[in-house]
Image: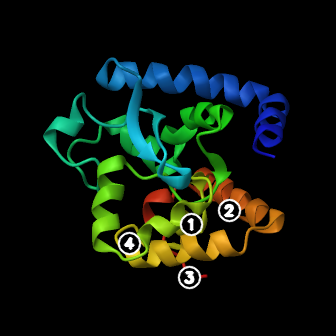
Amino acid sequence: MDLAVLAAAHVLLFPMWLVLWIVIPAMIVVDSGWPVFYRQRRVGLGGRVFQALKFRTMVKDADQIGPAWTSADDPRLTRFGRILRATALDELPQVVNILKGDMSFVGPRALAYDEHRDLSARVPGFDDRLRVPAGLTGLAQIYGSRHDAEQKLRHDLHYASTLSLWLDLKLLFLSVWITFRGTWERQGAKL
């Protein structure tokens, strides 16, 4: 299903994708120079570690300056990076990870390796969320608080136990809506 959605979206919306794939890298270079992409070790299905690809939203070598996870007011974010984060367009290159089978469109967020290791040590049962493929979007990304690991875990486990095409389509629609509104940084609505 992921490949069908990806192919259909690129065929039906080709002009928009072309603009995004040209304008975003150009704006990153103008705003903060090279490199355009950022690679990060993430944890996916069954605990498998993979390299997630994203557009760079932070200053160069930000991982050496602070932790892998960030807050909305993180001083390492670039001006254009703030826009990319608010619209979640920094995640666009992860379609490559979907093509490779590292992740799906919908599922628990693939956390950075260090963040996952930290939360696994602190939150009992946190690894249970890895029984389904990681996703670009999901219940926890849309409805969960950014800073409440237990709540995110409850959303991820609920998703894993109620998998359905209808739920995936709903979450995809909501994700597109939030992206167009540019409100990803303020997510945490009630179910």
Q: Look at the image and tell me whether residue 187 can be seen.
A: no
Disc 2 is placed on an element classified as helix
Q: Amino acid at mark 1?
A: Ile
For the C terminus, the image quarter is bottom right
Contact, CB < 8 Å: mark 1 with mark 2?
yes
Disc 4 is placed on an element classified as helix
Residue identifier under label 2: 174
Residue identifier under label 4: 149
Q: Look at the image and tell me whether residue 21 can be seen.
A: yes
Query: Seen in the image, is 158 located left or right of residue 117?
Result: right
At 59% across and 62% down in the image, what residue appears?
131
Q: Amino acid at mark 2?
A: Leu
Q: Earlier in the sequence, mark 1 or mark 2?
A: 1
Residue 142 - label: 1
- Location of residue 168 in the rendering, given as x and y in whole percent from the top left corner: 74, 61
Q: Earlier in the sequence, mark 1 or mark 4?
A: 1
At 66% across and 57% down in the image, what residue appears?
177
Residue identifier under label 3: 190
Depth order, front residue of 51/79 = 51
